[in-house]
Structure formats: structure tokens, C-alpha cells
Image (cartoon, rainbow, N blue to C red):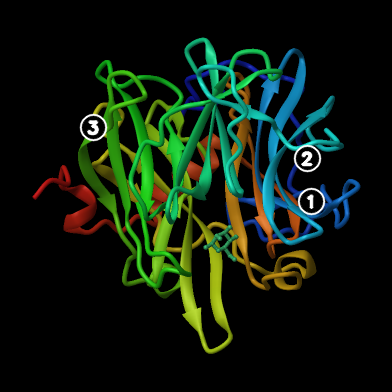
Amino acid sequence: MSEVKIIGPNVPNMPWQERPAGAKDWMPVWRYEENPVIDRNPAEGIARIFNSAVIPYEGGFIGVFRGEQTNGIPFIYLGRSRDGIHWEFDREKIAFKDEAGNDFMPKYAYDPRLVKVEDAYYIIWCQDFYGASIGMAKTTDFNTFIRMENPFIPFNRNAVLFPRKVNDKFLLLSRPSDSGHTPFGDIFLSESPDMVYWGRHRHVMGGSENWWENVKIGGGAAPIETSEGWLLFYHGVTGTCNGYVYSIGGAILDIDNPSVVKYRCKTFLLTPEEWYEERGFVPNVTFPCATIHDGESGRIAIYYGAADTYVGLAFTRVEEVVKYIKENSEVSVTDTEIGIR
Ligand code: BMA
């Protein structure tokens, strides 16, 4: 039995593959051998699906997918799967309504996260609100999707909701940005009593002196509650003469004060190496948006966008990844302080 525990439900049918023989055993994360799990042109009118989020639902899995339409504009599509690996997508994009039941579609929508909090499922994504900003919607049945008030003014991206209230408040990580490809960016935490009014903002962490994440970072998958704190998979970006490179990093946030970083891995956990990560619409991108995890076994499946073209799947065990993050932890003053000035 694992000493580090995931605090959360059991999902015994989650996708899983043991570390393949020969995979680098000094790294705690390994790739699914059949990657990518979603290929190009996955459905009529959609050229690419990537940067997408999935969740266990009714004995199987459901997800919200960034579908790049053949006109180049991204929207969110619903997908369903029995095994978390083979997906079927709705023909039409998700039809968002406002609270009065009128149609309320964003101009575009990308990088969705999907998080169950209490009795509802929340979708959080990036959309136009007079500039790139965060959109939110709520569903209880995956038939009706109600758009909620935009939590922040522009510019902001990479919003990630915590799966439960902390100190009786909903918590959201986000990354204030600019209107372009943003050559900077730290992760901040905001709290809300009602998912409408967000405030008491705290700095969580910024880029580090380690080069793989020295340009900017952003939230990835919804934090996983563990006996060591909130396990966060995030993306870290470096700049090269050929553009940005997006890798996956790991940190552990204090369970009651998640703006305090307890451990932060100085190395990436996964970086573009395979053809589907290095070659695509935007080369050299691994962009985590979700995990599925099993409390009983400690297994974690990480869903990540690859090269802005595919969806990849990687695996780890909570004990292994937490040990690696702790053993390779390097935290700065701005990581460990409460984050208010
Ligand atoms: C970011 C976002 C992501 C994308 C990444 C790499 O700014 O737009 O959707 O995966 O760039 O292109």
C-alpha cells in the first residue's frame, strides 16, 4: 500500500498501463504506448483535438474537448468514452445558454478544464471578453450548459478550479496574461463564496530559474488532493530561437493555504520528445489539462495536449511522483510566502 494517499474516489476502471520495459525509470511519468489517443481529423469539421479535459461519469468517462474547426476557430465539444482511451464526439459544439435559457455562445473557446465540485460539473476555458479571458459554465447532466458570469476581466488564461471548497471558499488558479502569446506569467489563486465574486487574490508561483520554465507557467490539471497536499501538474515554458517549448511540471501546494508551495520540482516531469509532441500545428508542446486518478491504487492518468494537434496520455503513481517532486524540490521565497503584497 502506498504511504502517500490520494484523497478521492476510487476509479478502478481508469485507463492504465504499467511502465513499459525500457522506459526511463529515473523519471516518475511514462507515456501510454499507443499515443496519441486522439488523432488528427477526429470528427467531421474538426481538424484537431488537443488541450482537453476528462472526468469519470456514470461508470465511463466524459470530457470537454478543444476542437479546432476546419475554419481554424476553436470551440468546445463533448466526448464520451467507456475506457477513457477511445472517444466519440458530439457532432455539434456545446450549446451554451445564459441563466435565462437564451443562447449564449462565446466567439471562440479553448483549453477547457472540467471539474466536479459538490453536485455540479464546471467547465472553465479561455474565451473573448473584450480580450482573452476566462469563461465558466455549469452543468449537472451534460445536456444543459449554463454560462456563468466571467470570473475575471481580461487578460487571463489557464483557469483551474479546485475540486472542493477550502476554508469554505471555492478556489480558482489562473494566469493573468496579455492579448498575444504572453512572454511572462505567474499562477495566482482567487477565492469565491459563490462562484460569482472572486477576490482575496494570492500569488502562488512564477517561472523559475530552471530554464525549462523560465518564461512563464500556467495551471494544468485540477489539483489532486493527497495526504501531502494538493498535487498540481502545470505547464512550464521556455523560449528558443524556434519559439516556445511547453513541458509538464509538478508542485505540491499546502492543503489549507494553497497559495503556499510546499514542494516544486526543479526538473520537468515530461517534455516534448515523441513525434506527436514535437511535430504538429505548434511543435514542442505538452500541455496538461486533466487527470483521472484512483484513490485505492494511487494510479494517475495525465491527459495532455501534444503539439496543438493530438491528445496524449501519460501515467504515474501518486507515491512515485510525490517522492520525485520532494526529492527534486527547489522552492523560492515567492513560492513559499502567502502571496499578498
Ligand atoms: C498557449 C495556449 C495553448 C497552446 C500553447 C502552445 O498560449 O494558446 O492553447 O497549447 O499556447 O501553442
Q: Secondary structure at mark 1?
A: loop
Q: Is residue 242 above or below residue 120?
A: below
Q: Position of residue 19 (x, y in %)?
A: 73, 47
Q: Which residue is mark 2?
A: 17
Between 276 and 133, the one nearer to me in the picture = 133
Q: Outermost residue, left direction?
A: 341
Please state which of the two labelled residues, at mark 2 or mark 3, is closer to the viewer: 3
Q: Which residue is mark 3?
A: 257
Q: Position of residue 183 (x, y in %)?
A: 39, 73
Q: Which residue is mark 1?
A: 20
Q: Outermost residue, top direction?
A: 119
Q: Residue at x 77, y 65 (%)?
A: 276
The amino acid pointed to by label 3 is Asn
- Indicate left or right for 160 with 21 as reference: left
- Pointers 2 and 1 in contact (CB under 8 A)? yes
How would you rate the neighbour count of disc 2 (Cα within 10 Å): few for under 14, some for 14-19, many for 20 or more? Answer: some
Q: Secondary structure at mark 3?
A: loop
Between 320 and 66, the one nearer to me in the picture = 66
Q: Residue at x 28, y 36 (%)?
A: 190
Between 111 and 271, the one nearer to me in the picture = 111
Question: How many dots with numbers?
Answer: 3
